[in-house]
Amino acid sequence: MSFPVELTAALSGASVSQLYNWRRTDLLRPELQDNPVLYSFRDVVALRLFVKLRSEVPLQRIRKAMTQLREWDLTEHPSTYTLLTDKDSIFLDEGNDRAVDLVRRPGQRMLLTLEDAFAPFTNLQGRDVVDFRRPRPQLEVRELRLGGWPTVAETRVAYDTVAKLIAGGVAAEDVARFYPGVTAKAALDAADFHQEVVQIRGRAA
């Protein structure tokens, strides 16, 4: 599944301009393609990790950490690594209580797990970043369901499919006539999240 810029921004917490700058400076280039820009699911996960780290440490330290990984020939996709921060340095967790300082001398550690990065947080610009697995109470993101595209919880119905029905004049309570598993509450959540994505697209235009 491929993720356009505005949906990537909504799920990762990165702004559209940040995504552009991070592509331009090779912090993270999309796995899929550059024109038009499309990100992979694991790109979105890595970007969310970067945004979470950026809320704790300066961007230069994240760049230095990624450079250090490459210098050590650790060239897997960034989403495969567990990173730690003590709000000063960034560490690579090697397991078994061993961590390697990527930026400064080792200090007190704070584990940045995927659970931490998937939970809601506030980014550096003060924007509330959605819960990655539950961008709205009635929506879910699961990598093995539609390639990680947000869907109505417990269904394979894409959030934007429902949002377009509502935009076309279908009442939330009537969406179940088209998709029996979609409640009115879920339909409203889908429309609300779609509006956030559209607003991001508008700001990027």
Image: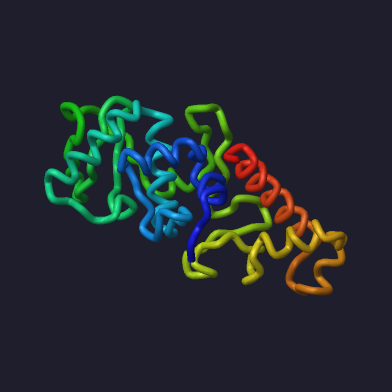
* Residue closest to the far left: 72
Foreground residue, 34 or 119? Answer: 34
Q: Relative to 109, is 80 above or below?
A: below
* Residue closest to the far front: 35
Indicate the quadrant where residue 47 lies: top left
Q: Pinpoint residue 12: horizontal percent, then vertical percent.
A: 49, 45
Q: Pinpoint residue 121: horizontal percent, then vertical percent.
A: 52, 37
Residue in view at x 39 percent, y 29 percent: 56
Residue in view at x 44 percent, y 55 percent: 35
Residue 48 vs residue 107: left or right?
right
Foreground residue, 109 or 34? Answer: 34
Residue in view at x 48 percent, y 69 percent: 144
Q: Pinpoint residue 16: horizontal percent, then vertical percent.
A: 51, 40
Residue 102 vs residue 6: left or right?
left
Residue in view at x 73 percent, y 63 percent: 162
Q: Pinpoint residue 97: horizontal percent, then vertical percent.
A: 20, 45
For the C terminus, the quadrant is top right
